[in-house]
Structures are given as structure tokens and as C-alpha cells.
């Protein structure tokens, strides 16, 4: 029966009634030392928890004074009797402190002493319950040491009103206050006057209390008045019953990062501005070039017309030099006409509204070949599946292809039979249309600049041209959401390619 648990004992022996039940209960508790003292402090009962905690078996300790559990310094202060006196006076006394086991080792105890009287109010003695909190104290200590030792973060606690209750070295380092200067003061001391005026500290605590925590960034003030950019987390501290007993606050100095971010922001804004300004001035220049080109057409037509009239009506009256000059005028007019036409085309692909629709690639290729008038002499090989569609503007795409085709036929090597191939390949939902030739090729260092307006690698006598064709290609392809590029080897040939997503359904708007 002595070994049975109280619950089992009750069921097994229903005749058992308190106080037997309570005695069994107390006896079997092993995590708490529960025992009785007589009014003088002599131990009268002993449970298994007491034996486990303090190391004394019952027969050894019963009858002894409970002061054997106290440390020498506590004994010197007469603490055992003082505690009994207070328990006698108030009915209850609670304390935490070091206590001594039989083997002399210490443990951190939570002790509750309760005055016990009978129904008539006669004092019978004291109940004493002791809990071993060594482990908890150890981990609290470790935690405290850890927090206190952190130097990169200010970690401190506050009471529910925001008054500071603890302070680590990180806080001292970051904010400049020593613990004794700041403990008891309100944490709003760290805020700027503007933030204090707008009651930010109050809102921080309210948010933390309502949501469990508050996170934010902002300028805070050190003891010496200097400011730093703080990244802050405030956490509400609640006891097991959910009552708010304070807040913890962790602050990190992010001034360097903030400076860097501000600098980056400033740079990117500057860059954006520069890009915007460049785009604006480019657009202005383009529209200027467009209107100039447009206005040049009429006088140009007049020059060409009169040169032709001169040729037809007055050629007989001119000597050879005069006829040479006339020839120069006519060919210069033709060149200028081509230049004006290309500039106008470039301006047009830049500014026209370009609604994209699904177009069959093979159709566009056939139209470009037709316009290039190069198809019948057998030098051109076409390898474009008839079922591929892309989103594009069909006339603009034709113009793009025409430019690539005429370049492929133009930049040929002397004495080499020209071979040009148009092919299409689909990879990962993108179509690459390539125009390859076996011509003069382009050195790697020039392969980027040829896409700019007026960039040409040869003089007019070797290869005629305006230097605008590839600029039109790039601008048009970009506006149709595509990309373009070149692979080339000098004296071997070039492959110019354009790439677009494969079309499924519907239509798209072109990029501006
Ligand atoms: P254009 O053909 O009027 O000179 P483009 O803008 O079309 O102007 O081409 C720019 C330059 O790129 C050409 O002058 C030429 O030097 C080079 N280029 C273009 N296509 C080829 C090609 N297929 N083979 C070799 N060089 C080429």
C-alpha cells in the first residue's frame, strides 16, 4: 500500500480518506521537497522529493532544525529564524536563494514557507515546499551573460510603461549611456524630438503590445546627441497568464548600410535622370532628323529633276568636263536620295504605332526575296518551315529581312560565288531566323558598332550604302519584342539573326 500512487490507493481502498490521501500524495511527489516544521523549526515530516533534493533519508533528518539547509552567510544573518518570523507574521513567506545539500553541494531553491494552524487557531508549525531551480537559474544566467556580452546589438528590457529595466554592453556602446545612467529612464530618450512630438515611442509600445512585436527603422539619438540609423525590434513580454510585464528591445546600428543604400538610391535616380534626358534628347534629335530629311526631299527632287532636264535637253551643248560634272551631280543626288529615304525609314520604325499580329514567317521571307529581286539566280537557299508564326508587323519585318538580304548579297568577296541562305529554327518557344552569307565577314571588334546609325566599315567605292540599314533592323526588332545579333568570321562569311517568341493566339502592342 505504501508504494501505491494516491489515485490507485483511492480506488483500491475507497475507505481511505484525507488526510491519508494527502499524505500519500505528498510522499510520492519527487520534484518538490515537501515537509513540516514544528513551531520551533524542527523537521517533523519528510517526503521522497525532499530526500532526493537534499540527500537526507527521513530517519536522519527528522527532528533536526531546518537551518541545516542554509549556507554559512545566511546562517550568520539568522535567515532561517527571520523567515519563520515573517511566515508567522504574514501567513506565508517566499524566497529564492542558495541552499545546501547533505553532501555540502549547493542548489538554487525556490522556498515557500506557510504557517499552519488548527481549526482553533493554535499554531501547529510550518509547511515548507522547496523547488530546485538550479537548472533554470543556470540557463537564465547563461542567457543573461550571453545578452550582456553581445556588443553589436543594443539589447535592453523595459517595464510596461517603457522605463528601462536592463541594459547590455551593446546598448552602452551603441547609445553611449552607462547602465546606471539610463536604467529607470524612459526609452523615448533615444528618439528624435520630431518622433517624440509625433508620439512614436507610445505607438511603438502599443503596436508591440497589440501584435506581439514591433519592427521598424529610423533615426535615433545617442547620448552625445549624434544620430544613427536604427533597425529595431520590440517584443512584448507576457507571463503565463498573458499579463504584460514589459518589453524587450533589440536595436542594431544600420547607419553604414543606410548610407550605402541612400548613395545607391541617389546614383540610380541620377542614372534614371540621365537616361531620361538622353532619351528625350535622342527623341528630339530623331524628330529633328526626320523633319529635316522630310524637308530635304523637295529641293532634292528639284535638283534631280533639273539635272535630268540638263542631261536630256542640253547635253549636246556641254563639253566632256561639263558632262562629268553633270554625272557627279546625278549620282550625288541619287546617294542623297537613298540617305534621306533610309533616314525617313529609320524615323518611321522608331515612331510609328506598331500593333503586332501573328504573321507567317515563310510569307514574310518570300515577300522580302521578291523585293530583293535576287531569288532566281540559284545563289539563294531558303529553309524556312511553312508553319511558323511570330508576332510582328509584317511590312516592318519584311523591311528588316530585306536589309539583311541586301547586305548579304552586297558584302561579297571578289571572285567567290555568292551563297546566301535563309533558315529558321525553333528552340524553347523562340524562332531564330538567320541570313547567312559567304562574304567578306566582320572582324569581332566591329561586330557591335555596325548596328549604330552611319557606322560603315568600308568606303563608298568598295561597297555603296548609307550605314543605316542595321540600325533600322535593331530598332524594328526591339520594338517588336525581338532580339538580333551577328556571328561572323573575316573572309569566311556572316550570319545575321533575328529572334522572336513563337506566336500562339491574339495580338500584342509593340514596345515604345
Ligand atoms: P550599309 O549596308 O548601308 O553600309 P548597314 O547598317 O546595313 O549599312 O551595315 C553597316 C555596316 O555593317 C556595313 O557598312 C558593313 O560594313 C557591315 N555589314 C553589314 N552586313 C554585312 C555582311 N553581311 N557582311 C559583312 N559586313 C556587313
Image (tube, rainbow, N blue to C red):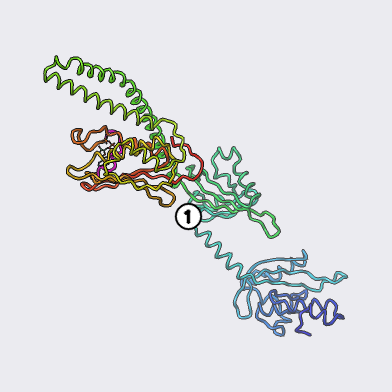
Q: Is residue 97 above or below residue 503?
A: below
Return the x and y of residue 304 as percentages of the image width and height: 25, 20
Magenta stretch, residue numbers: 444-454
**Among all residues in the image, which is located at the extreme left?**
320
Return the x and y of residue 178 as percentages of the image width and height: 52, 52
Residue at 16% x, 21% y is 325
Return the x and y of residue 24 as percentages of the image width and height: 78, 79
The foreground one among 203 and 392 is 392
Residue at 51% x, 47% y is 230
The quarter of the image holding the N terminus is bottom right
- Quadrant for residue 30, please give it: bottom right
Q: Is residue 445 magenta?
A: yes
Q: Quadrant of ligand 1?
A: top left
Q: Is residue 451 magenta?
A: yes
Return the x and y of residue 7 as percentages of the image width and height: 79, 77
> In the figure, is residue 58 to the left or right of 339?
right
Q: Residue beneath label 1, please?
A: 152
The quarter of the image holding the C terminus is top left
> In the figure, is residue 260 to the left or right of 446?
right
Number of numbered callouts drawn: 1
Amino acid at each position: 500500500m505504501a508504494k501505491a500512487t494516491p489515485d490507485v490507493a483511492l480506488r483500491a481502498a475507497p475507505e481511505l480518506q484525507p488526510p491519508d490521501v494527502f499524505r500519500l500524495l505528498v510522499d510520492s511527489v519527487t520534484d518538490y521537497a515537501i515537509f513540516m516544521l514544528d513551531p520551533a523549526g524542527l523537521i517533523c515530516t519528510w517526503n521522497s522529493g525532499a530526500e532526493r533534493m537534499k540527500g537526507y533519508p527521513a530517519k536522519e533528518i527528522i527532528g533536526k532544525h531546518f537551518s541545516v539547509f542554509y549556507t554559512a552567510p545566511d546562517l550568520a544573518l539568522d535567515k532561517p529564524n527571520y523567515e519563520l518570523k515573517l511566515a508567522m507574521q504574514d501567513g506565508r513567506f517566499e524566497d529564492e536563494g542558495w541552499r545546501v545539500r547533505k553532501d555540502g553541494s549547493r542548489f538554487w531553491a525556490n522556498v515557500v514557507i506557510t504557517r499552519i494552524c488548527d481549526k482553533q487557531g493554535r499554531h501547529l508549525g510550518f509547511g515548507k515546499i522547496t523547488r530546485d531551480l538550479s537548472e533554470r537559474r543556470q540557463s537564465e544566467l547563461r542567457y543573461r551573460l550571453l545578452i550582456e556580452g553581445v556588443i553589436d546589438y543594443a539589447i535592453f528590457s523595459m517595464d510596461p510603461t517603457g522605463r528601462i529595466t536592463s541594459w547590455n554592453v551593446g546598448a552602452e556602446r551603441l547609445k553611449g549611456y552607462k547602465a546606471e545612467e539610463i536604467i529607470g529612464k524612459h526609452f523615448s530618450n533615444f528618439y528624435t524630438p520630431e518622433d517624440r512630438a509625433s508620439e512614436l515611442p507610445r505607438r511603438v509600445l502599443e503596436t508591440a503590445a497589440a501584435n506581439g512585436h514591433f519592427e521598424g527603422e529610423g533615426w535615433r539619438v545617442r547620448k552625445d546627441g549624434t544620430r544613427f540609423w536604427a533597425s529595431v525590434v520590440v517584443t512584448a513580454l507576457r507571463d503565463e497568464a498573458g499579463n504584460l510585464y514589459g518589453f524587450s528591445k533589440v536595436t542594431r546600428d544600420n547607419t553604414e548600410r543606410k548610407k550605402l543604400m541612400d548613395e545607391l538610391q541617389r546614383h540610380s535616380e541620377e542614372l534614371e535622370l540621365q537616361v531620361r534626358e538622353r532619351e528625350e534628347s535622342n527623341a528630339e534629335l530623331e524628330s529633328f532628323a526626320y523633319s529635316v530629311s522630310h524637308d530635304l526631299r523637295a529641293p532634292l527632287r528639284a535638283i534631280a529633276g533639273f539635272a535630268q532636264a540638263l542631261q536630256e535637253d542640253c547635253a549636246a551643248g556641254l563639253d566632256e568636263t561639263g558632262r562629268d560634272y553633270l554625272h557627279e551631280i546625278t549620282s550625288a543626288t541619287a546617294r542623297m536620295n537613298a540617305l534621306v529615304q533610309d533616314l525617313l525609314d529609320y524615323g518611321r520604325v522608331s515612331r510609328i504605332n506598331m500593333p503586332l499580329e501573328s504573321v507567317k514567317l515563310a510569307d514574310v521571307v518570300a515577300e522580302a526575296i521578291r523585293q530583293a529581286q535576287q531569288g532566281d539566280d540559284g545563289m539563294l537557299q531558303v529553309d524556312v518551315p511553312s508553319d511558323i508564326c511570330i508576332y510582328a508587323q509584317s511590312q516592318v519585318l519584311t523591311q528588316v529581312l530585306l536589309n539583311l538580304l541586301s547586305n548579304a548579297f552586297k558584302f561579297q568577296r571578289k571572285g567567290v560565288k555568292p551563297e546566301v541562305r535563309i533558315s529558321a529554327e525553333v528552340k524553347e518557344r523562340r524562332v531564330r531566323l538567320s541570313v547567312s552569307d559567304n562574304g567578306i565577314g566582320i572582324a569581332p571588334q566591329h561586330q557591335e558598332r555596325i548596328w549604330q546609325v552611319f557606322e560603315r566599315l568600308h568606303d563608298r567605292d568598295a561597297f555603296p550604302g548609307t550605314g543605316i540599314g542595321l540600325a533600322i533592323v535593331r530598332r524594328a526588332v526591339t520594338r517588336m519584342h525581338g532580339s538580333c545579333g551577328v556571328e561572323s568570321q573575316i573572309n569566311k562569311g556572316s550570319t545575321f539573326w533575328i529572334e522572336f517568341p513563337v506566336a500562339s493566339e491574339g495580338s500584342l502592342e509593340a514596345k515604345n
